[in-house]
Structure formats: structure tokens, C-alpha cells
Image: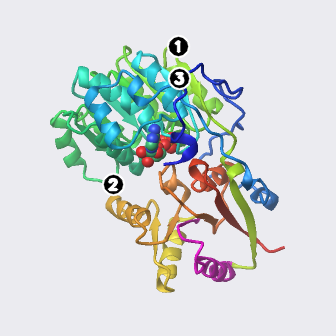
Amino acid sequence: MSQSYFGGRANRGPKKSNSNNNRFGGRGRSSQPRQKGARKQFIHPSKFINRTAVDQTPEVYEPTHLFTDFALDPTLQKNLAALKFTAPSAIQDQAIPLVLDGKDVIGLANTGTGKTAAFLLPILTKLARKPERSSVLIMAPTRELAQQIEAEAKRFSRDMRIFSTVLVGGTNIDRQMRDLKRGPHIIIGTPGRLNDLLQRGALRLDGVQYFVLDEADRMLDMGFINDIKKVARLLPSHRQTLCFSATITPAIQTLIQEFTHSPETVSVRTGETSDHVLQDIIEATDKQHKHDLLHDLLSKEEFDKVLVFGETKYGVQRLADSLTNQGIPSAAIHGNKSQSQRQRALRSFKENAVKVLVATDVAARGLDIPNVSHVINFDQPATYDDYIHRIGRTGRGGKHGKALTFVDKR
Ligand code: ADP
Ligand code: MG
């Protein structure tokens, strides 16, 4: 894992204070959620260029705890050791004690810094003490994220006899209803499917003691606000609420106020991801020219794990097909694919069976894909915010990444 986030020595002394930590909002830009179908923003090409800032040394966080210092369940501790989780990341270091303490927590940290474990580890510890059915509800914006959360939960909870189920769209709902009848402890779902199951009377939320909103910013971006509210209204008011996000916007603050009770905020956001990413533009005359340029780039050896962003589902699929036909094995991920097709595409990219993954913004949200060497914006993002999210897929964990954006030749 990365040096900067997880590799730090535990510092038993007083915590080093960083003026940007623990302050609500940090120095992030605030951004407005984009409505579906909104017009494309004009973004000046100069905003896609950053040829100098790559050499900055990543900040090293010195945690004040080791995982063994936390009052986590003993089996969980054993599993963490086996997974080589020794030093907590900043968000884990600061949020885990608060969650164990029963506080409502708002956790703000950059993508890829271990937010999942920050809420799963204390929750699994509480579940081990009191393994009640349907007592944990975790909401995530996409199917892939929900599945990633479950995969992490499974790794952490080996031999703990804690069971979970994933409730997401694009998969058989009858099977999910059967899974629910078996009484899992942890329910992980996307807002749409959760509501669907609630309406069918297949899901009950009156036993929920822990409610997690993961990637809250992405959920709002994707227009899930009403679905989230509908679900939250059915939750018992005596519960612990945890909300994790990479950015904090006024809309998220409102949401937080509505759902939490005197929350503690842990903000360990550092500068925009773009600081660590070498960015440049490539001028192209038309679509065919973009195809040719892309093909040339992808033929170079240093482009060994490339995420290409396109605007539409069809465009993304066509691009992946045509690259594959030209001898560059590529997979596509977008909303027109079935759940299993999306998973297969993601896996083949993660496992290096293909070196190119072509994606739409929505399909790529929040996915944890390590070691992406390049992000290429084949189509320009609709907003600068989307741009930052796209290029945040590379240069993770303090590593340098590269991002290239095609712009119209003037
Ligand atoms: P985020 O939700 O903040 O984007 P994730 O929870 O997806 O980040 O974590 C990113 C990756 O880092 C995952 O593969 C996870 O297993 C790994 N990871 C998280 N915490 C640690 C840690 N303390 N030590 C080692 N690896 C970690
Ligand atoms: Mg996450």
C-alpha cells in the first residue's frame, strides 16, 4: 500500500497538528451538485494543464495509534494483522475511536485513503459484541461500491460469523428478497434498490442501529437525495449515523444536519488531487483524429493501465470495441451493462487482463482501482468537478499520475 496514507510509523507522542486538519471544510472548493441533463460547462483548456506540480513530496501522516491500540474485536485484530493492516490512515486513526465511542461522525478524506475501514472496523466490533440481524445499514452510490464495501467487510470479518447482503439494482430482486429472509447483520445497498425493497415490504429498517452514508457527495451528485431521505425516515431515531465523503458541499451539510445528532467531524482532506497529477492537453481536429491519437498513445509502453473517459454509454462501448479490434484489449464500463458484465470488465482491468478501461463518469465513481498510470479524457468532462474526480483515479496514495485531455484544435 501507499507510503503516505498507510505506511507511516505510529507516533505515540502528542499528535502533530496540521493546520488543515480537523477543520470543517478544509481548504476544498465548494461545489454544487450537478443535475441530470445539465448543460455542459465551458472549461478553459488551461485548466486541464499542470506541467510543474508533480514533484511535490506526498505528505506523510503519522498516526497516533496502531490498529492494536484500538479496542477492536480480537478476531478482527487477527484478521487485520493477516491482511498486513498495521498503521491506520489519517481518517482511520481519528475516526475509529469516535465511532467506537458511539458518536455520530462526519468523515472527510480524499478518495483512496481508507474510509471504508474507518467505519467497518468499529461497526464489526460492535456487531461481534451484539450480533443483531439487520442492525447495520450502509448506503453507497453505485453497485460496484456497494460490492467493494461487502468485499472489505468479508475480508475483515473472517471467522466472526457476521453476515451481509448487497442490495443493488441490475441483479435479481427475488434473490435479494430471499437473502433478506435469512437475516443478514449488515445490509449494503444503493438508494434506489433499497427503496424498491422497502416498497415491496421485503426490507424492514426498524432494527437499524448503525447507519452509514458512504461517498455522500457522489450520492448527491447522482441525484439520490430523495431516495436517501425516504430511507432515512424509516430508521429508528436512536441510532448511530456515520457519513463519509471526499468533499463537503452545502447540500451535504444540510443532509448531515438532518440525519445526525451532534456529530463529530474528522476532516483530513489534503490539497486537491490534481496537485499530484501531471496534466496536459492534446489538440485534435475531429473524432477520427482523437481515435488515431488515442491509439498512438495506448501503443506506448508507459501507458500500461489506462482509464479512458467518454461521455455517453454508446460512445464508451464503441470506443472499447474499436480499440480491441485494433489490437489494444479494452473493457468498457457504463450504465447499459448488466451487473455481471460491469463486474467482469472491472475485474479484467484490475487484474491486468486488459490495459484499458473505457468508462462513463457515473460508472467510474469512487471505484478503487490501484495503480492507474494514465487517465485520458477522450471526451471532455461536463464540469470541472467531474474533471477532478476523473483524474483522481490516478496518482493515488501519493504516487504521481498523468492525465491527458483531448481538446478541439483552435
Ligand atoms: P476510500 O473509501 O477513502 O476511497 P478505501 O476504503 O476504498 O478508500 O481504501 C482504499 C484501499 O486502501 C483499499 O484497497 C483498502 O483495502 C486499502 N487500505 C485501507 N486502509 C488501509 C490500511 N490502514 N493499511 C493498508 N491498506 C489499507
Ligand atoms: Mg470509499
Q: Residue at x 46, y 62 (%)?
A: 334
In front: 366, or 312? Answer: 366
Residue topped by disc 3: 12
Secondary structure at badge 1 equals loop
How far apart in space, not on screen, are marks 2 and 1 (Cα)?
37 Å
Residue 253 lies in quadrant: top right
Residue topped by disc 2: 170
Going by the numbered disc 3, the residue's amino acid type is Arg
Question: Is residue 141 visible to us here?
Answer: no
How far apart in space, not on screen, are marks 3 and 1 (Cα)?
29 Å
Secondary structure at badge 2 equals loop
Left or right position of 133 against 70: left
Q: Residue at x 51, y 55 (%)?
A: 364
Give x and y (percent) for residue 209.
33, 21
Question: Is residue 180 visible to us here?
Answer: yes
Q: Which residues are magenta?
A: 287-310
Going by the numbered disc 1, the residue's amino acid type is Ser
* Image vertical order of residue 226 relative to residue 34, above or below: above
* Image vertical order of residue 306 relative to residue 30, above or below: below
Whether ligand 1 has any atom under 8 Å from the Cβ at mark 3 is answered as no
Residue topped by disc 1: 262
Q: Are marks 3 and 1 in contact (CB under 8 Å)?
A: no
* Label 3 or label 1, whichever comes before in sequence order: 3
Q: Are marks 2 and 1 in contact (CB under 8 Å)?
A: no
Task: Kindly report which numbered mark, 3 or 1, lies closer to the viewer in this rendering.
Answer: 3
Left or right position of 195 against 182: right
How far apart in space, not on screen, are marks 3 and 2 (Cα)?
47 Å
Q: Quadrant of the C terminus?
A: bottom right
Going by the numbered disc 2, the residue's amino acid type is Gly
* Image vertical order of residue 277 relative to residue 103, above or below: below
